Image (cartoon, rainbow, N blue to C red):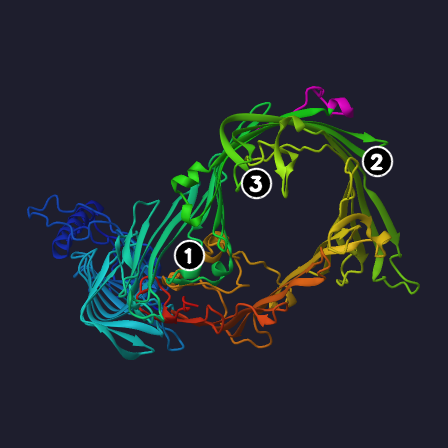
Amino acid sequence: MSHIFTKIARIELHTKYHLVLLLSFFLLFSAINVFAQDLPDSTLVSFPTVKDTSRVNINSFPLNARTRVADSTKQDSIIAQPDLISDIVDYFGKDYVYINRKENKVYMYNEAYIIYQDMRIDAGLIILDYNKNEVYAQGIVDTSGAYTQRPVFVQANNTVEPDSIIFNFDTQKALVYNSRTKEGEINVIAKIAKKENDSVVYMRDVKFTTSKDIDNPEYYFYARKIKFVPGKKIVTGLTNLYIADVPTPIGLPFAYFPLTKDRAAGFIIPTIGENANRGFFFQNGGYYIPISDYADLTILGDYYTNGSYGMRLESSYALRYRFRGNLSFRFEKLINGERGFSPFEPFSETSVYNLRWSHSQDSKANPSTRFSASVNLGSSRFFQESINQNNTASFLNNTLSSSVSYSKTFEGDPQININITATHQQNANTETINMTLPTFTGNVSRIYPFAPKTGIKKGIIQNINFQYDVQAQNRFQTTDSLFFTPQMFKDAQLGAQHTIPISTNFKIAKFLSASLSANYQETWVFKTIRRDFDPTLNEGDGAVVQDTVDGFEAFRTYGFSASLGTTLYGTFNFGETNKKGQPKLIQSIRHVVRPSIGYSNRPSFEQFYDEYVQNVAGTPDETEVIQYSRFETTLYGPPSLLSSSNVSFSVSNTIEAKIRDKDSTATEAKKISILNNLSFNTGYNFKADSLALSPISFRGSIPIVEKLDINFGGTLDPYALDNNNRKINTFNINNGGSLFRLTAFNVSANYSFSNRDFDGDNDEDNTDRNTNETFRNGGRPDDLFGNSNDFRGNQNDTNQDDEDDTDYEWYKYSIPWNLRLAYTLTYSNPGRQNEISSQSLMFSGDVEFSPRWSVGVSSGYDFKNDGFTYTQFRFQRDLESWQLSFNWVPFSTRSSWYFFVGIRSSVFSDIKYDKRREPDQRL
């Protein structure tokens, strides 16, 4: 366009200027009136007037022109037609904006755009036609021959990326060629699309997929014709599934795909399969209900043709900056065999259930009030017998625990804290349950009655302080069969303890820290016992009769204690450099010793003990007096009958070293730990008539390398054993033995490392434990004991909207891997057993042999029983939009396998295939 110019010449007028001026105004207004009636309404773009319409200087036009309303027909008697373009039109072209007045078109080229109301089109070339009130947009071909700057059509919240597009301002309809649009997780590619209005688009020859690679999707659904309602639904005719552009026999005569961004209620399609023991089944079918913006509910059910069934209710809720949580209840009615059919397969019918609830409060919600819950209770055999999961970690875990707590802080001086907690402990092997419903604790913060109003507290008097603590419990001890029955509540134990500790601390000779304390405690109970000897029972030999007495009882105890401790430091310096001036490997070693001695005294509380007389067994004529406490079976136990005067000793050791840093740029030596907290503890009871010296307990930790510590502990007994392996009041060294007997010892080590440790990347795993299914069921959050297979289709929970920045280039020199090790050894020798009671090595690891293929194994070896522990093999294949997994337990009573392949997107979660072999419950 550089050759276009406008030539203007100045010629002097040789006539009367006022006549010329009048004639010019007349001709100008006449031209305006004619122009306004020939072209569409006055809402068209207003352009500058030039003499030469065939040669236009591009620099004379603004790059961003706007259409404005100009009333030029006031003097026209013809009634004006309604405006076709009723708003401002913004348009732009980087290289040029060319206005053809003859064709009444505007051409915009290179990075062009046009904006009209809520519609915007960006493209390489845009043509605005005022005769038809249409805009045409397409891409351009660059110097390399590539088709670039494809149109991008945006209207409201809808975005379409076609090869070309025609849009009519009047009808608001558009004709789109080779369009591409995205609704949620679904990418829609259509050869021809006709936009009827803001809410309906008709398409022909359509592909829709969740693949990120739109040009070459690994799978797609192909439909001949569809009706597309953005943000609401896709309705199709005949639809086929294509995998790698190969048609499959999977198809539907019609299909409906909801596209609502908000949660919507709907049915959940069940999984259909066959079980060898229970026949055909429908699993995990149900209904989803979005209760509100803050909570939802999922109802799932199972049915087997032999009569077994299951039901699950799951709900998640959250309120931003306040709280979040989830609740689930699972129930299964399990039938094995057929009634009276075969003696080799006996009939059995059981019911198992499980309740889980987790609730966490945001720390910003209320600083003075806190409520939290972590509940996992139900049938002790649920994880062993459930048929709708293969949760290995939960199967190996023998303890279920729960806690629901509410705490409140009352600010002031002193501060008052209260806490109400309900707890639950359940052993899956013994089926015993211990529950507190509830436990109440309250305390008043420390009060210093002699502290100065200003300044630091000094001396024994100013540091005197006391506080008040109270604890009350309603405790139940029951079994699975009596859980929440009237008998359970009848056997409940109720009690409370009030404690007032008084203490002070001070310094002695600047280096010794001393403390003195006294403790007063009062215990309330509401059930006691009474024992008597009835000589008429047990065929005349007599027997002890125990009765439970309801009513309020209390006892009070008190005691005194003192402690003295200090810290000793010892450093040995080797020097920073050797004779050659080179830095030494070990420059110094420091040993820190913290010894302490304590004394405690507690009197006898025999006033709370009663007596009864009974016959001596085998000698009816002789009797003996038996002393007992009516508080023996109460919640907190009886007070001590024997007085005690104990002195305790403890010492802890820490050894550290400064070594030369491998980093040559480091200016200081590196500090490492050689021995962590090697501590010894023992005591001596002055009032004991025998075995006054307590066994010495020790524990410690030895760091080996980073993230690997060897933890150990044990017990040393100074007393000897007799020929019946009973402890006697004789030191072992005086009985011909060593100074101490090692009666117990344990050692453990845990180590996890990966290729990232050698690459200098030590990022820790930030897995959210609250969403980990294994951890919520009471197991470990890692896969040391295997991964869980949840048959509810949770493999499809991956959201493809999340950006995946993983570089899937082939590995050149390193293959990603990780390994976790856990070793434990327990030695037991209280009665000359001299045996290793348990010794095992557990390991778990994963290796990515290729960017999308990983293999893992979890296993271990039991050295005590000479056999492998629970073993699981895992195979994972990332198929981009699809996922394939295979888990296999090759042996043990939990021998099973599970295969799954399906689309990762939750929209197409029903497009999957899974097959499994469940563990044989009869084993």
**Image height of 673 relative to 849, above or below:** above
The residue beneath circle 2 is 511
Residue 747 visible within the image = yes
Q: Nearer the viewer, residue 80 or 201?
A: 201
The residue beneath circle 1 is 382
- Disc 1 vs disc 2: which is toward the camera? 1
Q: Is residue 515 magenta?
A: no
Distance (Cα) linking label 1 and label 3: 47 Å
Mark 2 residue crowding within 10 angstroms, few (<14) / some (14–19) / many (20+): few
The residue beneath circle 3 is 541
Q: Nearer the viewer, residue 4 or 731?
A: 731
Could you tell me the amino acid type at mark 2?
Answer: Phe
Residue 155 visible within the image = no
Q: Name the quarter where the N terminus is drawn.
A: bottom left
Q: Position of residue 365 (x, y in %)?
A: 46, 37
Q: Which residues are magenta?
A: 440-462
Q: Residue 915 sits in which quadrant? A: bottom left
Q: Position of residue 779 (x, y in %)?
A: 51, 56
Which numbered disc flags the more N-terminal residue, 3 or 2? 2
